[in-house]
Image (cartoon, helix red, strand yellow):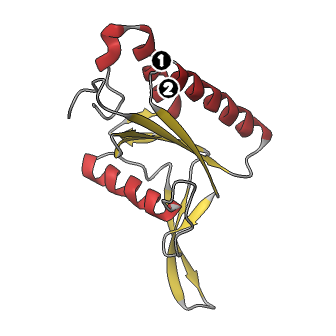
């Protein structure tokens, strides 16, 4: 994969679950403030916050978000990214099948984590947090720490964000 240079646009998309408890909301707000600081300092070009429900039915008509991309499409993109890179998201983006006796069909539902952070380079999805790669777990916090380290040391500007190098 390529190394980030000044010509690449780095955009973060923070997915937050609606109807979170007070503790989760405080954590979400602190993370939003940190991302705003990273944007202000030029570490990232932009960040977007998208509020989602706790689950998304993958067979439902798309409900378009603020940037015109549906949550269903975004979750599909996350699943494709993980499959292409050998990264596991199943423990944090839990998928289950629901059978409806009324509709007489089955639907796939994905339960979303409280917080997830998507890293886009030039509009291409490059990393998703949280995730697992092998026995290693990578959190949203680790991604943010890595980005902060980039800000503090020019030597670390080529630091990789686990598990993606860009």
Quarter that holds the C terminus? top left
Secondary structure of residue under mark 2: helix
Q: Residue visible at 73% across and 33% down?
A: 26
Q: Residue visible at 49% across and 70% down?
A: 58
Q: Residue visible at 48% across and 17% down?
A: 148
Judging by the rendered image, the residue that carries numbered circle 2 is 144
Secondary structure of residue under mark 1: helix
Q: Quadrant of residue 158?
A: top left
Quarter that holds the N terminus? top left
Q: Quadrant of residue 8?
A: top left
Q: How many marks?
A: 2
Given residues 68 and 131, the one toward you in this image is 68
Judging by the rendered image, the residue that carries numbered circle 1 is 148
* CB under 8 Å between discs 1 and 2: yes
Given residues 34 and 131, the one toward you in this image is 34
Q: Which mark is residue 74?
A: none
Q: Is residue 125 above or below residue 164?
A: below
Q: For label 1, count other residues whose C-alpha is less than 10 Å away and answer few (under 14), some (14-19) or many (20+).
A: some
């Amino acid at each position: 994969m390529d190394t980030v240079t000044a010509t690449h646009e780095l955009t973060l998309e923070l997915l937050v679950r609606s109807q979170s408890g007070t503790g989760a909301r405080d954590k979400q707000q602190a993370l939003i403030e940190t991302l705003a600081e990273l944007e202000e300092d030029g570490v990232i070009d932009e960040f977007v916050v998208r509020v989602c429900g706790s689950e998304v039915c993958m067979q439902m008509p798309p409900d378009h978000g603020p940037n015109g991309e549906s949550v269903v499409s975004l979750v599909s993109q996350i699943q494709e990214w993980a499959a292409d890179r050998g990264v596991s998201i199943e423990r944090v983006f839990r998928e289950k099948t629901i059978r409806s006796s009324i509709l007489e069909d089955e639907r796939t539902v994905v339960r979303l984590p409280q917080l997830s952070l998507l890293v886009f380079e030039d509009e291409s999805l490059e990393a998703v947090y949280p995730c697992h790669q092998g026995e290693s777990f990578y959190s949203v916090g680790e991604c943010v720490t890595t980005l902060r380290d980039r800000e503090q040391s020019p030597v670390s500007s080529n630091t990789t964000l686990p598990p993606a190098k860009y």
